[in-house]
Image: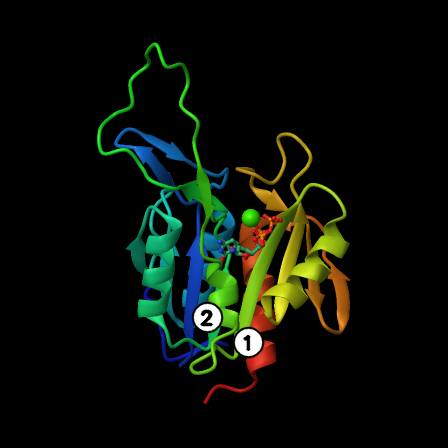
Amino acid sequence: ARLRPSSGALAGRRVLVTSGPTHEPIDPVRVLANRSSGRQGHAIAAAAARAGAEVTLVSGPVAIPDPAGVTVVHVESARQMLSAVEAALPADVAVFAAAVADWRVATDAAQKMKKGAGGPPALTLVENPDILATVARREEGRPTLVVGFAAETENVLDNARAKLARKGCDLIVANDVSHAGGVMGGGSNTVHLVTADGVESWTTMSKEAVAEALVARFAGRLGAPE
Ligand code: CTP
Ligand code: CA
């Protein structure tokens, strides 16, 4: 079907989405990674495009195809993701669905590390930039709506409320990733929308249905198209 970008609930809006994991190099053949299929973030980008938005998707390494009607920027590391996000701004809505590696190796080796008499290497880790917090705290050109995700294994709502405040975003989509064979890589998601006004818990839906419902919510929060 032909996309009709001039119509839809997000017509005329710019939407930025991060998705997938990041890979932080250890040496030329090894990475530190995160578990994320990219399915939820990619579904949000696709749904926003179907709603008429001009969408940029900044994606870490994933095994799923680029969504239709979306500009996709492929990155590997958290620092590359931050640069790509800053280059893609301004946006009306920014959605941070990526599972960003919290740490990277302080100095990645130029050559493949070899086993040897020295035993296993000790990796020194340093913290990656927080992409969501960097964008949410921008003085100029902050997106109208900054949306974060919180993948938690315990105390889901308390952790999500703390993240909302700490990162300065407008909405956190929280989910419980503790159950094996569950949301990570799976097709469905059970989410809680956490804002300053409170919590709204949604029934379990496909990631596509969650994406559609989130996009409708974004459109509602932005108001009538300009
Ligand atoms: N996020 C980000 N950049 C990072 C880390 C996280 O943009 N370096 C974003 C994620 O995309 C997500 C939100 O921040 O939207 C929350 O990520 P999460 O890992 O749950 O939060 P952290 O602040 O990293 O806390 P922790 O992992 O310790 O729970
Ligand atoms: Ca994290």
Q: Which mark is residue 51?
A: 2
Number of numbered discs visible in the structure rendering: 2
From mark 1 to mark 2, how far is it between C-alphas? 9 Å
Going from N to C along the chain, the mark reached first, 1 or 2, is 2
Residue 66 position (above or below residue 145): above
Q: Position of residue 89 (x, y in %)?
A: 36, 73
**Residue 183 quadrant:** top right
Dot 1: what SS?
A: helix
Could you tell me if residue 69 is visible in this image?
Answer: no
> Quick check: 196 above or below 79?
below
Q: Residue at x 36, y 43 (%)?
A: 61
SS at circle 2: loop
Dot 1 surroundings within 10 Å: few (below 14), some, or many (20 or more)? many
**Farthest bottom residue?**
226
Q: Is residue 217 left or right of residue 12?
A: right
Nearest-to-viewer mark from 1 and 2? 1
Q: Quadrant of the N terminus?
A: bottom left
Q: Nearer the viewer, residue 103 or 152?
A: 103
What colouring style does the render use? Answer: rainbow
User: Which residue is tagged 1?
Assistant: 219
Few, some or many C-alpha atoms within 10 Å of disc 2 (few <14, some 14-19, many ≥20)? Answer: many
Q: Which mark is residue 20?
A: none
Q: Quadrant of residue 33?
A: top left
Name the amino acid type tagged 1.
Ala
Task: Find residue 125 and report its horizontal and vertical position in percent.
Answer: 45, 40
Q: Amino acid at mark 2?
A: Ala
**Farthest residue toward the top?**
117
Residue at position x 52%, y 71% in the image: 136
Residue 161: x and y, percent?
A: 72, 61
Disc 1 + disc 2, Cβ < 8 Å: yes
**What residue occupies the far left of the structure in this picture?**
111
